[in-house]
Amino acid sequence: MGWKETLQVILFIMAWIPVGILATTTLVGAQANYGYDFSIYNDSYSGLSQFANNIESNGQDVMSIQASMSVASRYNGSAVLVIMGPVRDFTIDAAVVILTHLMNGGGVLIADDFGSANASLSLLNFLMNSFIGSNTTKGLLSFVHGVLLDLDSYDPAKDPRLPIIRDFVRNGIDQGALTAGVSELHLNWASAISPYCLLGQLGIAWTTPRSWCETNITDPTPDPDPYELSGRLPVVGAVDFSTPQTPNGGRLVAVSDPSIFNNDMWGRFSGNRQFGDNVINWLSHGDNSQPVLFCENLLEVPWWSSEFFFGLYLGRILWLSSLPFLAAAYPLITTLGIKKYLPEIKKPEVKSVSDVFLRRGQTYFSERMTYYRTEGNYARVVKMLYRRLRRGLKKTQHWSEYSPKKLWEVMHDKDPNLKESEFFRTIARIEEISTDTSITIKESEMMELFFFIRNIQSHVIDTKMR
């Protein structure tokens, strides 16, 4: 038996392992113990089972995403995507899915604390820059590091780390819909939304002026330090991408404390419950037929758990089956792949811009990013980002021609710690990929090059535009 036949047998056995585990646990009557924080299947104080049950009692379906966020694309914007307490970084796929979901009119709720999602949100912020303009200094959304303390409004039986929010903006972008019937929100070891990002500037729930985000969370006698953000800070923000032409546009709500919705806080405080109802209703435009999708694949699931095992094996399958053009042909593709010992399937290429359907409200850049994400052509992503960087440099620096040497002189002045050899080696690699997009690169390398380009843009282009 040759190596191809051996590989086929190994892949066949591995593919049936999840089915075997499911059949075995069913026969022996094993009961799952789902104790992960912010999981809709967790019935303890840190779970979201009561929040999920309340959504279902209001007539909406509740589903969980365990493997790939790409399944959200199946709903074409007619769903609410919930990202609660994420500890895993978004992939490029997930960031583009969120962007596409918003542009198709879908609702997104992101609840995070301590800024654990900021690394992932930087990618989403970069993709959203073309839609929100340059009126913000830190993109669409970012969270402040540290624990929020409020000396003027907190649970008297506890301490200032459990703030009570009573300052609401009733005439904001939501016209008071999110805080209707809410007199106070109880937080539990929360953070704050950066007041410099768009969601922070559109904040609808704020702390008192005597609050700050303490970075030394173990300090028994905390005090605000000069480098810690203090003052009146937003904890809830919302943005609506609806226009007169598209009245049911995408909506995004950001909350700096996912504990607002957990079983403990949900059961004790009516304001939290009313706020949860308002958020889901506003994000779905009052349409109870829209399902609510909880992204449980971003929770802190250990590698030895069955959920992690499920996501690892079936994530790519769900990703492929979510693509509108390949979903119908996927069973045939799978059959042919096994028959031919799983060869690499030749992927179609777009020949011209006219081959890409630009939907209303979309830009050429976002459509191409969506296409390359579905095709997994990360070399093309690098080429698009590099071309965009060069155009921005010519415009902001008034260059007639782009030159890596001139760029190094500017960057060395902006970032003295930057190493010249590493800089030119990375630029050379980017130009190599841009010259020949048939080069196959991994997603990890694409992400490294993305943050390298993003660093240049933030130092040279964005600062120049402000």
Image (cartoon, rainbow, N blue to C red):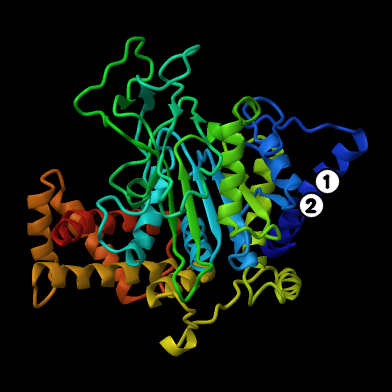
Residue with the most extreme right position: 27
* Residue 257 appears left or right of 131: right
Q: Hey, what amino acid is under mark 2?
A: Trp
**Residue at the (44%, 75%) spot, across then down:** 361
* Residue 414 appears left or right of 322: left
**Residue at the (65%, 25%) spot, across then down:** 45
- Contact between marks 2 and 1 (CB within 8 A): the answer is yes
* Residue 308 appears left or right of 171: right
Nearest to the observer: residue 78 or residue 460: 78
Q: Hey, what amino acid is under mark 1?
A: Gly
Nearest to the observer: residue 72 or residue 271: 271
The kind of secondary structure element at disc 1 is helix
Nearest to the observer: residue 87 or residue 164: 164
Pointer 2 residue: 16
Pointer 1 residue: 20
- The answer to whether one can see residue 154 in this image is yes
Q: Give residue 57's mark.
A: none
Nearest to the observer: residue 147 or residue 37: 147
Query: In the picture, which quadrant includes the N terminus?
Result: bottom right
Q: Residue 455's spot in the image, x, y percent? A: 24, 53
Q: Residue 27's spot in the image, x, y percent? A: 92, 38
Q: Residue 76's spot in the image, x, y percent? A: 60, 68
Decide: is 55 above or below 251. Answer: above
**Residue at the (52%, 71%) spot, across then down:** 375
Q: Give the crowd class for mark 1: few <14, some 14-19, many >=20 residues within 10 Å.
A: few
Query: In the picture, which quadrant includes the C terminus?
Result: bottom left
**Residue at the (41%, 56%) spot, across then down:** 124
The kind of secondary structure element at disc 2 is helix
Counting labels gives 2
Disc 2 to disc 1, C-alpha distance: 6 Å
